[in-house]
Amino acid sequence: MGFSFCSACRWCCWLYGNKCHCTRARKKEVIDTRPTVQVEPLAANNHQVIINSYGEIKPLENTQLSAQVSGEVLSWHPNFVAGGIVARGETLFTIEKDNYEAAVLVAEAELARAQAGLIEEQAQAQVAEDEAKRFPSKARTDLFLRKPQVLSAQASVKSAQAAIKRAQRDLANCDVTAPYDALVISRNVGVGQYVTMGSQVAELNNIETAEVIIPIAGFDSIFLPERVKGITATVIQKGLNSFTREGVVDRDLGIVDNATRMSSLVVRIEDPYGLKNKQPAIKFGSYVQINFAGAMLNNIYRLPQELVNNQTVWIVNEDQQLEPRKVTVIREEGEYFYISDGLQADDKLVITLPEYPQKGMAVKIAGNQDTKKIDALESASTEKL
């Protein structure tokens, strides 16, 4: 025991048992063993829910085209082939018209004959009426006044007019036209072939509008707006040449699937093949992703999923100690959880936890020099000495 040079404080100190007990040495012996963590302050925000689903592109309508008259096929449109696209009103193929033109002439002749008969009966009725006026005291029957004959002649005229309409319709139906902008799926006729009334000649898909039926899971259905009709949707075609198109939610199918317990919405896409809007074509049968805006969530915390374990997150409290917090996760989107309860604004969320976190564990915050805690540790160490 005596004065000697101390290697710890680089000073001549009083040594006892070969150990320096000076202030400098005691300060150097103080070691802060608290684990270091990184934190982020929390802030609540409003969040627009995005509903995400998938579905298959289908035509709004599919038509099994049939001939409405019988006859021989004379010609067909160059695009009237499988995979061809035809515009609304274009003639797909033509049936021989001779018999139907003749039928129109016969109907017109019958109409002229009926009109002549009506004029004759009306004239005779006028003569009978004049004669009845000359002898007002004498009773005259409707048959004498030729009222039944006039009614019969009028009926003949109407019948002839109806026959003309039928004949003209049949003549017009010799030119079979596209009922809408269409994609030809199949064609079953050729030049010289005789087709009969009602025989199926082609299959067409409407390309003016397409539909996608998308399933909505139960956890998404609670975030649907009260009125879904008219909501703008984003249609995403993935793959090597990915692109997006715009659609509109048209309706809710109004049922829940027995197997999946999901409801379904229908999204419509105008001009799916891009004939008018010059956008990329979405072919029928394509599998696409649909996104659209759901409900708005207010005062919500968004946290990365790796920070939430068993509905629990860790924060650093005012005493700079770890504190577990039970939270309520109301939605998951991508790599984030959205939390409604359990957190407060300006809470310090721990983003890098110690290996074995414990409630009440004292920690250091990275980048924050805690001088008060260091002084406390030094004081405690001095008192022990």
Image (cartoon, rainbow, N blue to C red):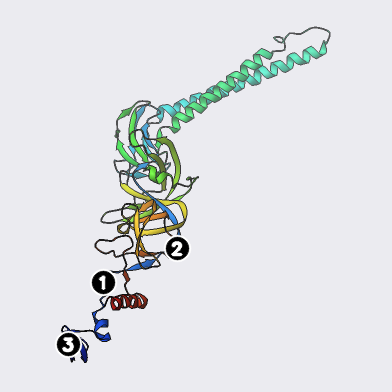
Q: Nearer the viewer, residue 293 or 222?
A: 222
* Residue under numbered circle 2: 345
Decide: few, some or many residues near mark 2? Use Cα within 10 Å; few <14, some 14-19, many ≥20: few
**SS class, disc 3:** loop
**Numbered tag placed on residue 1 in the rendering:** 3
Which comes sooner in the sequence, label 2 or label 1?
Answer: 1
| Residue 48 visible within the image | yes
Q: Is residue 297 above or below residue 72?
A: below
Which comes sooner in the sequence, label 1 or label 3?
Answer: 3
Q: Residue at x 28, y 61 (%)?
A: 357
Say which quarter of the image contains residue 183. Answer: top left
User: Contact, CB < 8 Å: mark 2 with mark 1?
Assistant: no
Q: Nearer the viewer, mark 1 or mark 3?
A: 3
**SS class, disc 1:** loop
Q: Nearer the viewer, residue 29 or 60?
A: 29
**Numbered tag placed on residue 33 in the rendering:** 1
- Residue 195 percent across, percent down from the top left: 33, 28
Q: Kindly identify the amino acid type of the residue bearing the numbered disc 1.
A: Thr
Q: CA distance from mark 1 to mark 3?
A: 32 Å
Q: Is residue 300 above or below residue 111?
A: below
